[in-house]
């Protein structure tokens, strides 16, 4: 894997840094909306290359005691399969370890990814 840097925060992050994400989403947020979403999260992990290219980010919303929800784990398509997503989720799980439950919703094709990280598939009502 190329050298990457994981940071906890959004200092210096610009909407242009978030281009190329949300691939396959039927109605993805605009770059400005993406930036606001990331900045509004209670916890965030941003992954950049040594030259400053943002290649991934993950967010969590939490009360820091009982519950947390991980709504976004995004890695640029050209950087997927290198362990970046797993490292970001692991970092979030570590920060959220005081919570009784940590939930996320994902497509069926990525369930095995989260199961490898210790997740358990459960039923939900939408």
Image (cartoon, helix red, strand yellow):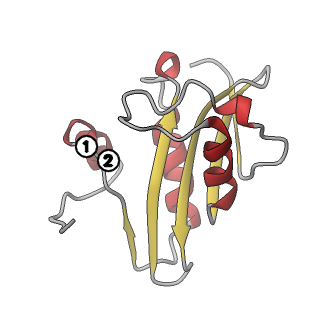
Kind of element beneath mark 2: helix
Foreground mark, 1 or 2? 1
Q: Nearer the viewer, residue 86 or 26?
A: 26
Give the number of the disc on residue 78.
none
Determine whether, in the image, residue 7 is placed left or right of residue 99.
right
Residue that sits furthest to the right in the current view: 12
User: Image height check: is 97 above or below 90?
Assistant: below
Residue 36 in picture, x, y percent from top left: 67, 52
Say which residue appears at 56% left-offset and 78% top-offset.
64
Label 1 to label 2: alpha-carbon separation: 11 Å
Q: Residues within 10 Å of mark 2 (few under 14, many from 20)?
A: some
Name the quadrant of the N terminus: top right
Residue that sits furthest to the left in the current view: 123
Determine whether, in the image, residue 42 is placed left or right of residue 101.
right
Residue that sits furthest to the bottom in the current view: 65
> Which of pointers 1 and 2 lies earlier in the amino acid sequence?
1
Name the quadrant of the C terminus: bottom left
Residue 34 in picture, x, y percent from top left: 61, 44
Residue 5 in picture, x, y percent from top left: 71, 34
Say which residue appears at 52% left-offset and 33% top-offset.
84
User: Image height check: is 17 above or below 87?
Assistant: above
Give the number of the disc on residue 107.
1
Disc 2: which residue: 114
Residue 91 in picture, x, y percent from top left: 56, 52
Say which residue appears at 55% left-offset and 80% top-offset.
63
């Amino acid at each position: 894997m190329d050298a990457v840097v994981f940071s906890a925060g959004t200092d210096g992050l610009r909407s242009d840094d978030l281009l190329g994400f949300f691939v396959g989403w039927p109605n993805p947020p605009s770059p400005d909306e993406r930036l606001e979403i990331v900045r509004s999260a209670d916890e965030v992990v941003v992954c950049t290359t040594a030259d400053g290219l943002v290649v991934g980010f993950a967010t969590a919303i939490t009360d820091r005691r009982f519950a947390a929800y991980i709504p976004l784990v995004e890695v640029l398509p050209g950087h997927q399969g290198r362990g970046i997503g797993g490292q970001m989720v692991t970092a979030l799980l570590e920060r959220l370890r005081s919570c009784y439950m940590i939930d996320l919703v994902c497509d069926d094709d990525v369930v095995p990814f989260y199961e490898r990280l210790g997740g358990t598939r459960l039923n939900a009502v939408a």
